[in-house]
Image (cartoon, grey):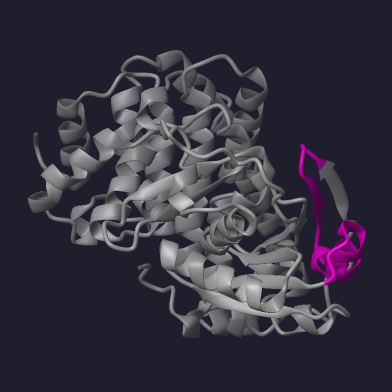
Amino acid sequence: MLPDSSLRDMVVCYDNALIAARNPVTAEIYTYNFPTRIRFGAGARTELSQTLTQLGIHRPLIVTDRDVVTLPWFSELPAALTSPVAMFSGVWGNPVVSQVEAGLAAWRDHGADGIIAIGGGAPMDVAKAIALMANHPGHLFDYEDGKPDGRPVDQPVPSIVAIPTTAGTGSEVGRSTVISDDQTHAKKIMFDPKLLPAVVLADPDLLLGLPAGITAATGMDALTHLIEAYLAKGCHPICDGIALEGIGLVSQHLTTCVQFARRLQGGESLSPEEHQAHLTARGGMLNASMMGAIAFQKGLGVTHSCAHALSTVCNTHHGLANGVMLSAAMRFNIVTEGDRFLRMARVVNPLATSGYQFLEWIDSLRMGIGIPGTLTELEVSSNVLDKLVMVAEQDGCHPLNPRPVTRDDFYAIYQDALGVAP
């Protein structure tokens, strides 16, 4: 869990941000097709009803989490719909199979024909899994990506309209869903282009009230996607270009978002000019998040394998796990990827002369937004090191890491992140 991710903090932030669905900031809304149709801009959420009509959705199921459903602006979304709508808000933490099964029961009880996914990565992933299983037989994990005897995704998948409320996973533009086993907490990835949401309504208004801790952790998740996609093995210059631009957006906007969030949590109100600056920063991070998810079609790396193990073994929030592991993982990678690190360094500092300056920038950013510097600060003990290494070694992300990762390397990376000598 994040230290300031309580419902109380979220409601305070949203109240102090002075946002409401009936008073969206007037701004131009842009359309991106990449390949998902994305409507981006303040007030984009008000296009929900017409979007459902365009997609032929007449009985939508809203999938969200138990915190988002209580926020001040939320109730006006279903209230604005003319279609019969049902709600499933039983998502929290790292999503698990039982949440998908409960959502699937709600889908069937309502006779739903489409899904509105509202929230961060967890509701997005549960929504995709519900959509996958709506017309496919068997167990969700029968469709695990790369499983030798896995079942094909060969039946229709209902349309999803995604409304993100965090800037981290970018799951709203992703082709996969990551769901954990209830007992083992092992993460499984289901992947297919049919899981892409049909339309994304990307409204930075909905991010204005995120608490500082959630803002920081999800922002580091987005940054990790961008960095690891750029470094991943293989040739994909399109993803490389998107990743570099996204890193630039994070460097411009993440610290600003966290600073405004801290002020709002402290009870301050913002001037109209500050409100607009906050909105611009949130929009920058929302774009960076989506760009990260698009770019990591190319692949991810060792940071994610380590973070997935932390979520499995210690139930650590995924974005926070990435944020704490990133520096140690990049210290491992720079040994063989100096030229690429120099290019990233020049994105955040055009005068950079060494890739090591990018590592310094990551550490400076992390400290400035309040992400812990070591796993020890998260109360992760070396006693679980063997379990972490075992899970990380089995994870599917590190094979695309630019530098091969052995078991001994995993031990060394974790020990670095723990702040202890190997």
| Residue 393 in which image quadrant | top left
Residue sitting at x 48%, y 82%: 7
The segment highlighted magenta reads 33-58
Q: Is residue 212 above or below residue 380?
A: below
The reply to whether residue 210 is visible in this rendering is no
Q: Where's residue 71, x and y in %?
A: 62, 82
| Residue 47 in which image quadrant | bottom right
Residue extending furthest toward the front = 137
Q: Of residues 133 and 97, which is closer to you in this image?
A: 133
**In the shown orientation, is residue 421 left or right of residue 88?**
left
Q: Is residue 102 above or below residue 127?
A: below
Residue sitting at x 85%, y 70%: 58
Q: Of residues 164 and 206, which is closer to you in this image?
A: 164
Residue 42 among those drawn in magenta: yes
Residue sitting at x 65%, y 40%: 154
**In the shown orientation, is residue 208 left or right of residue 404?**
right
Quarter of the figure with the C terminus: top left
Q: Where's residue 379, x and y in %?
A: 18, 61
Q: Where's residue 365, x and y in %?
A: 44, 47
Residue 315 among those drawn in magenta: no
The reply to whether residue 201 is visible in this rendering is yes
